[in-house]
Amino acid sequence: MKTRTPTDQATRPHEVGVDVAAVALHDVSKMFGALTAVDCLDIAIRRGEVVALLGPNGAGKTSTLDMIVGLSRPTDGYVEVLGGTPRSSVDQGWLTEVTQSGGLVSDMTVFEHVRVMADLFGYPAQRAREVVAEVGLADRASRKVKVCSGGERQRVKFAMALVSTPQVLILDEPTTGMDVAVRHQFWAQIHAEAERGCTIIFATHYLEEADQYSDRVIMMAKGRVVADGPTAQVRALVAGEVVSCRFADIASAEAAVSLIDDLADHVERQAAGLTIATTRSDEVLERLIMADTGATDFRVADRGIEDAFISLTEARAS
């Protein structure tokens, strides 16, 4: 088998043309019998973008990712990766994926997993050692996967995905099991990959990760895109603020809800506390104070991406 070096992989974007989208879905639909899992998606993702894919269970995220990596084919439409088919990009090592579960052999070591991928793409063992060190697992290289933590297993899969210096990297709930420090380190590595031109598409249920680490958010509900744009733009789709406060008891909190219900877009109850999403925060505060509800610990903040997520996906579901 021919031995390649990382510099061979670095020239790949020029081989397929720099003007070609990293990933493009053209009027893509996916049916499972009478169920429409994905409904007429038209999406183009540029090279070097970090894109978060969000949506409730059943939104079509997994079906979309499966079609991008070639695990399934669209019922209608077609998918392009780097100007070709998903399968051709996978075979060349241009497209790799880090899955949430599975993909590891319990009795193999960390290094052995990465070495298998290096062998597959014609790299020497040194390439495997470099990637293991890059993801912070050099001191665990000889450890068997069965005794690795959940976060360590995710980093093993990340290392395996990086061996071929991919141009498109798909991540499904990538930080599951990682502690806060390791999670920050992981995202620093992800953005280093993006800076060299790699396109990152990740599905996550950590909404704060989408807010902090993505350039673009694509929200899905019932198989369709309900919002697509820069993170700040998607957040701005739901204007207003979030007012939070506390009460002496649950009864007082419930009474306050009826008092400001006509001013609120959404009210969340936490025991004797309320979180109120509204575009009329001044009026909410005035009523709670003037009516002597006993509310304390007032806080007012801009609405975040979680509020956009709830509002947009619920609107699509209704």
Image: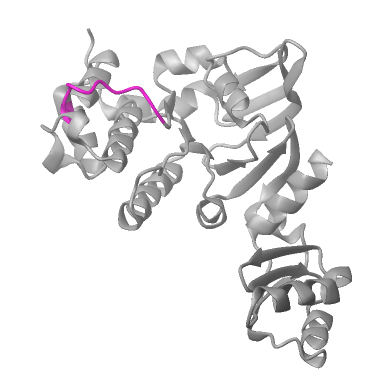
Q: Position of residue 275 (x, y in %)?
A: 67, 69
Residue 304 in the magenta stretch? The answer is no
Please provide percent x and percent y for residue 159.
29, 33
Please state if 29 lies on the left or on the right of 104 as rendered: right
Q: Is residue 309 above or below residue 232?
A: above
> In the image, 260: left or right of 296?
right
Which picture quadrant has residue 233? bottom right
Q: Main secondary structure of the magenta part?
A: loop
- Say if residue 4 shows up in the picture: no
Q: Residue 14 or 230: which is nearer the viewer? A: 230
Left or right of residue 142, residue 190 in this image: right
**Residue at the spot 74% in from the left edge and 32% down from the top edge:** 222
Q: Which residues are magenta?
A: 101-111
Quadrant occupied by the C terminus: top right
Does residue 102 show up magenta in the picture? yes
User: How many dots with numbers?
Assistant: 0
Viewed as shown, does residue 1 lie left or right of 41?
left
Query: Where residue 244 sits in the image (x, y, percent)?
Result: 66, 75
Q: Position of residue 56 (x, y in %)?
A: 65, 40
Taking the spot 54% from the left edge, 37% from the top edge, the residue there is 47
Q: Nearer the viewer, residue 130 or 245?
A: 245
Asked which quadrant contains residue 80, the reply is: top right
Q: Residue furthest right?
A: 262
Q: Quadrant of the N terminus?
A: top left
